Amino acid sequence: MKIGIYVHVPYCAKKCRYCDFASAPIKGREGSVGPYFARLWKDIERTGRYYGGRLEADTVFFGGGTPSLVDAGYICKTLDVISKHFTVNQGAEISIEANPGTLSREKLASYSASGINRLSLGIQSFDDGVLSVMGRIHDSMEALKSYELSRRYFNNINLDLMMGVPAQSLKIWLDTLSRAVGLAPEHLSFYSLQLEEGTPFYNDYKNGLLELPSVKEDRLMYHEGLKLMEAAGYRRYEVSNAAKPGFACRHNLKYWTMEPYLGFGSAAHSFIGGRRFEDGSLPVLSEDGALSEEAFEAVVKNSTSFVSADPGRVNDLKGDFIFTQLRLADGMDRGLYARLFGRPIEDDFGIPLRKLIKEGFIEEAEGRIRLTASGLDATNPVMEELLSAL
């Protein structure tokens, strides 16, 4: 059975003002890095033993935090441990997240030599004023240098960008996007700022100290940005992701299409056999910690059909299907829903589906249900309307 593997590296240089990810500044925690990875390698070994080498990883993703902040030796050894205890597909997509200011020729060469073949670079903006307000550790010149250096080692690069942030106008956003497109990366991620409780941005906004672009301005940034990317040959395949042909992120597509994956490290989650669990909560069904052949067959079966899951969990999985599939430009696959849940999607969501189609927020085409242009600007309300049927 093919799976994705996610590895979480929780260290960063410093917390950005908008970030609520499971990460912490490495300063003062340097002594924890070695023990963290030692535990990580043991968990990978234990899980590999549990599944008996019967899982084939066709994607691996190092996320964080900032994985590129730690010594490259930790990353390379982690990949070695994964390869030892799982079958890693020869054509696997192996990605690592990196930030400008944390890369060097030596690191990039080590990544490439170890088998990593995709780099996701956290640029966020090419405007120094915006970068400063966001609390990033780099400026636009360092971002450009990091990209040019990375290009010597990788032919599959993603640039992470953010819009709707303080100090950002439509002109500034389109200038950033134009510069990004001009570099010709294979993939672009473009997210609107989400204010997360507990972050400095959230607290400043709550206290009236932070001015953000209006919703109308944010939506204009989004749609004008899409035009620019499409004109440059990028196809939007998910609400906030676009790629040149053949370069959609295969690992992230697993999340959006409910394919199985294993997560390792702090705050990592797994989805396999039709259930979600945190690393460390893997059940043990035999004395030697290995999964029996019969139990493994059940895992495979339950990864391709959720019909036998308990009713409460089935509803959760249906909600996950709506939330993830509707983000795809191609939309929700009717056939996949029927295969996973053993019934047509109309049996569960017929009333809100008909209402949203009539209102022009979603449309049907070629066996799929997808957001319209109006629906893209009302993604959360559309999902809420659908989920109210559960």
Image: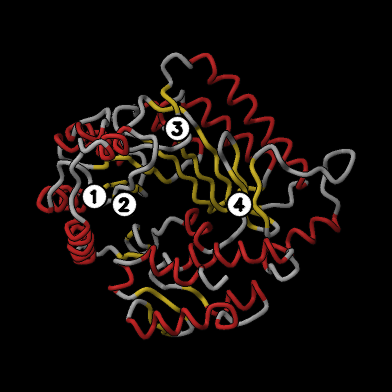
Q: Are marks 1 and 2 in contact (CB under 8 Å)?
A: yes
Question: In the image, what residue occupies the spot 24% across and 38% down?
Answer: 148
Amino acid type, callout 3: Pro
Horizontal arrangement in the rendering, residue 390 relative to residue 69 (left or right) = right
Q: As displayed, is residue 2 above or below residue 63?
A: below
> Crowdedness of circle 1 by 10 Å Cα count: few (<14), some, many (20+)?
many
Query: Which one is in front in this view, the residue at disc 2 or the one at disc 3?
Result: 2
Tell me where residue 219 appears, x and y as whole percent.
Answer: 22, 61
Amino acid type, callout 4: Tyr
The residue sitting at the right extreme is: 287
Mark 1–mark 3 distance (CA, rounded to whole Å):
23 Å
Amino acid type, callout 1: Met
Q: Tag 2 or tag 4, which sits nearer the N-term?
A: 2
Question: In the image, what residue occupies the spot 72% across and 63% down?
Answer: 302
Residue 163 numbered mark, or none: 1
Tell me where residue 28 appears, x and y as whole percent.
Answer: 45, 13
Tell me where residue 119 appears, x and y as whole percent.
Answer: 39, 43
Quarter of the image for residue 311 reads bottom right
Quarter of the image for residue 68 reads top left
Q: Secondary structure at mark 1?
A: strand
Q: Tag 2 or tag 1, which sits nearer the N-term?
A: 1
Q: Which residue is mark 4?
A: 261
Q: Which residue is mark 3?
A: 67
Query: Which one is in front in this view, the residue at disc 4 or the one at disc 1?
Result: 1
Q: Quadrant of the N terminus?
A: bottom right
Q: Quadrant of the C terminus?
A: bottom right
> Crowdedness of circle 3 by 10 Å Cα count: few (<14), some, many (20+)?
many
